[in-house]
Image (cartoon, coloured by chain):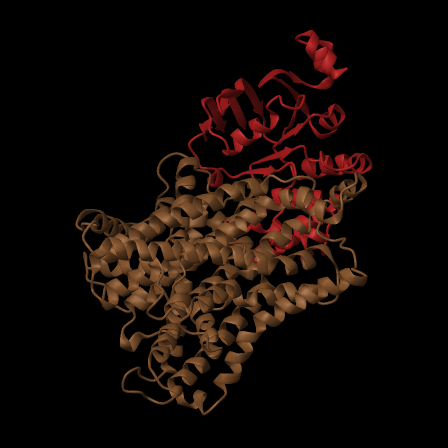
Chain colours: A brown, B red
């Protein structure tokens, strides 16, 4: 216990350098670019900024409120009652949440809802219903029923009980769900880029347009700064609500739900069915339309402009494997530092590693382009793609593994040390086998994230390194029914692979999906 | 021979041990007896190297081991809750120390079955930890501690988490095993009867220091103060 432990230094250094060079440094470059050189008051810029900023805020707020309203009936049903298929329904409602945003966008294009605000809002609701059902439902299902009954005995009607007892008790969960939905929709990129056409742009989309299409890097940087401020505020709100969320009242174990009867039964099952049908519709239409006119066969044909669409599947697989290895290794190292008993360093790490989660993917991709010309010019290298994916995935690996590592009793490690295991050996013999399952779940998340990642990849993918989401976007951007069909076919392929991996995770994991 | 000289340990600004002096001779078993919170467990942890020593010394055969890292001390410690590894089976637990010492796998296998034989659990090799009863866990923990043949065996409340009936049976078995293996041992307990049955000599601990050592009869015949008389009454 004296002297420097070099192994430990290495374990802390790798994640620090990785996050430092690929995340913090580009972010600092964007900040300095955005805050210094541009005169915000110049004509046009200010107006554009106001317009985009206002739209981003507005659509995120409306999307959040709509999501809460749409999710409410199903949340009520699955958390208060027991009925056949309840578990399946909660699993199914999660499907849209894990789909890549490009697939969601394409599904709504398949519905014919392109270029409209309605399409954007609907897609956001579609994507986020699961967040509300899962977050609010978990607490609602565990509220002590005696509270409800006591209020009834005291003379309150059902509606009155809901307003004066249930709703206030659920408020922390609702607030947490709302802030996470707000965060997702505030930083929405793929959905808005595909469904918004030229009329609607969030900050995220505008950063992309300014930087990639119009080459106005400075304006993009200003937008990125505004974006960062918004995201930080939303994350701060979320962490505050989360804290309060954990201080709980009289909770029961999540078991004894009553079986609904009569009208209640009709309402409960009806609201679940209606929600699931509404969520299934866009996907069904997507699958249906993808089947027409040789779309799948077209994926194998070489094209002068976009290349061979199916080749993007191979690209995505390779990138996903590299990203998963990177994210799992670095995430585990970081988790080891966070759970190692070194107070200050561990807390600092915990915070820093969550940052990529809050930063938008577009900002990460944009940062790479702005900053990574030094010391070696990496900007043209394909390795940036899996690195960007790993950055986005690391927080998920950390979040999956830290609770397990924390739960390993300290005397296990001490017993191993007393029996002659060096610190490194203790990690290999005790920590690693015990955290393996959680790490595998984290790796699964990393794989899915990499497969679906679009925001950062759209900046750094070259014609020959297009991933599946990038290829789908390219196909969608090209006029003509053949391209549309191929985009839909490729979306179905991506959705199927993603769903397969997620189902595998769900079987392997212990906790709940969608805790973010 | 273990000698602890004027040992002081401070944890989170609180002096847990101060001026603690104690020796354990080769093949002798000493029981540290004291009320809970008197610093007994911390004493074992300091000897094992799990907590930092602030003052004084811990010596084995007259050589200080204070600067030797935990995993190189070659002492054995049986933890209060046993700390069996849930991801390993009984053989994996018992053979752990041998593997860490680089023992060849065939030898690990035979040594593990020998150790299980000592504690009366022959054939338990492939059992999972979760399938064991409380008494079986205690024996596996004991076998795990003894298997690498450490030069010093420390037992922290070895029967503390078992029910009364089981304790009465296991205390004599444990003593016979320790004596039979010619173990140099340090046992920590808050139970007077257990202490006398398990050891050759008692060391009474109170508020972070050893106040008196000797056999039960010797101490009772000549107690250093009223607290000792009362505590042993």
Q: Position of residue B70 (x, y in %)?
A: 48, 38
Q: Is residue B48 above or below residue A479?
A: above
Would you say residue A283 is visible in this rendering?
yes
Q: Is residue A397 above or below residue A97?
A: above
Pick the residue in front: A127 or A310.
Answer: A127
Whether residue A222 sits left or right of residue A96 in the image: it is: left
Q: Position of residue A499 (x, y in %)?
A: 53, 71
Furthest toward the bottom, the residue is A293
Please report the residue visible at 73 percent of the width from the left and 26 percent of the height from the top. Answer: B191
Please report the residue visible at 53 percent of the width from the left and 58 percent of the height from the top. Answer: A66
Whether residue B179 sits left or right of residue A330 in the image: it is: right
Pick the residue in front: A455 or A147.
Answer: A147
Would you say residue A511 is visible in this rendering?
no
Pick the residue in front: A228 or B176.
Answer: A228
Q: Is residue A216 above or below residue A179?
A: below
Please report the residue visible at 39 percent of the width from the left and 50 percent of the height from the top. Answer: A231
Q: Position of residue B150 (x, y in %)?
A: 56, 40
The quadrant holding residue A407 is: top right
Q: Position of residue A194 (x, y in %)?
A: 39, 71
Whether residue A505 sits left or right of residue A86 in the image: it is: left
From the image, which quarter does the N terminus of chain A lie in?
top left
């Amino acid at each position: 216990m004296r002297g420097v432990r070099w192994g430990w230094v290495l374990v802390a250094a790798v994640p620090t350098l990785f996050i430092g060079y690929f995340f913090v440094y580009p972010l600092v470059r964007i900040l300095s670019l955005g805050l210094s050189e541009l005169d915000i008051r110049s004509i046009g810029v200010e107006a554009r900024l106001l317009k985009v900023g206002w739209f981003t805020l507005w659509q995120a707020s409306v999307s959040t409120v709509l999501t809460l309203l749409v999710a409410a009936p199903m949340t009520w049903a699955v958390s208060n009652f027991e009925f056949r298929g309840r578990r399946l329904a909660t699993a199914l409602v999660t499907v849209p949440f894990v789909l890549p945003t490009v697939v969601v966008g394409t599904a709504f294009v398949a519905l014919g809802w392109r270029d409209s605000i309605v399409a954007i809002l609907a897609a956001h609701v579609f994507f986020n219903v699961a967040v509300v059902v899962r977050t609010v439902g978990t607490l609602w299902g565990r509220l002590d029923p005696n509270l409800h009954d006591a209020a009834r005995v005291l003379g309150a009607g059902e509606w009155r009980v809901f307003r004066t007892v249930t709703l206030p008790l659920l408020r922390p969960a609702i607030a947490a769900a709302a802030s996470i939905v707000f965060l997702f929709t505030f930083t929405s990129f793929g959905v808005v880029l595909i469904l918004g056409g030229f009329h609607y742009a969030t900050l995220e989309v505008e950063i992309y347009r300014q930087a990639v299409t119009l080459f106005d890097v400075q304006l993009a940087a200003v937008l990125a700064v505004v974006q960062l401020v918004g995201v930080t505020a939303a994350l701060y709100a979320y962490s505050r609500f989360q804290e309060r969320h954990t201080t709980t009242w009289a909770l029961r174990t999540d078991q004894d739900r009553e079986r609904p009867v009569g009208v209640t039964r009709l309402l409960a099952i009806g609201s679940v069915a209606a929600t699931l049908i509404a969520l299934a519709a866009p996907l069904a239409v997507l699958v249906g339309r993808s089947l027409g006119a040789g779309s799948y066969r077209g994926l194998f044909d070489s094209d002068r402009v976009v290349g061979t669409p199916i080749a993007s599947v191979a690209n995505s697989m390779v990138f996903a494997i590299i990203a998963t290895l990177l994210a799992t290794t670095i995430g585990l190292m970081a988790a080891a530092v966070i759970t190692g008993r070194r107070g200050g360093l561990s807390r600092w790490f915990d915070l820093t590693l969550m940052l990529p989660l809050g930063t938008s993917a577009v900002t990460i991709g944009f940062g790479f382009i702005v900053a990574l010309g030094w010391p070696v010019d990496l900007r043209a290298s394909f390795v940036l793609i899996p690195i960007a994916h790993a950055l986005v995935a690391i927080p998920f690996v950390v979040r999956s593994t830290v609770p397990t590592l924390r739960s390993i009793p300290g005397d296990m490690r001490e017993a191993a040390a007393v029996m002659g295991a060096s610190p490194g050996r203790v990690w290999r013999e005790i920590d690693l086998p015990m955290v393996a399952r959680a790490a595998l779940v984290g790796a699964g998340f990393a794989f899915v994230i990499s497969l679906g990642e679009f925001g950062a990849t759209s900046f750094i993918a070259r014609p020959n390194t297009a991933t599946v989401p990038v290829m789908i976007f390219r196909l969608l951007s090209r006029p003509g029914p053949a391209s549309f069909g191929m985009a839909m076919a490729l979306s179905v392929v991506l959705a199927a692979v993603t769903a397969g991996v997620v189902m595998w995770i769900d079987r392997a994991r212990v906790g709940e999906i969608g805790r973010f | 021979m273990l000698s602890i000289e004027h040992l002081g340990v401070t944890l989170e600004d609180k002096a847990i041990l101060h001026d603690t002096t104690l020796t354990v001779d080769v093949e002798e078993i000493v029981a540290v007896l004291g009320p809970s919170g008197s610093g007994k467990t911390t004493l074992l942890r300091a000897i094992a190297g799990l907590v930092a020593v602030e003052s004084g010394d811990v010596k084995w055969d007259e050589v200080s081991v204070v600067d030797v890292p935990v995993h190189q001390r070659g002492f054995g410690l049986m933890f209060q809750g046993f700390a069996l590894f849930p991801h390993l089976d009984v053989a994996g637990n018992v053979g752990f120390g041998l593997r860490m010492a680089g023992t060849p796998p065939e030898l690990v296998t035979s040594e593990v079955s020998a150790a299980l034989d000592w504690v009366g659990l022959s054939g338990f090799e492939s059992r999972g930890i979760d399938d064991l009863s409380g008494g079986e866990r205690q024996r596996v923990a004991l076998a795990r501690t003894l298997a690498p043949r450490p030069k010093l065996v420390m037992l922290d409340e070895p029967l503390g988490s078992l029910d009364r009936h089981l304790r009465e049976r296991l205390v004599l078995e444990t003593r016979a095993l320790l004596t039979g293996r010619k173990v140099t041992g340090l046992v920590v307990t808050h139970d007077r009867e257990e202490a006398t049955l398990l050891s050759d000599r008692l060391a009474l601990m109170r508020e972070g220091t050893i106040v008196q050592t000797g056999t039960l009869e010797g101490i009772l015949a000549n107690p250093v103060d009223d607290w000792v008389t009362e505590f042993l009454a």
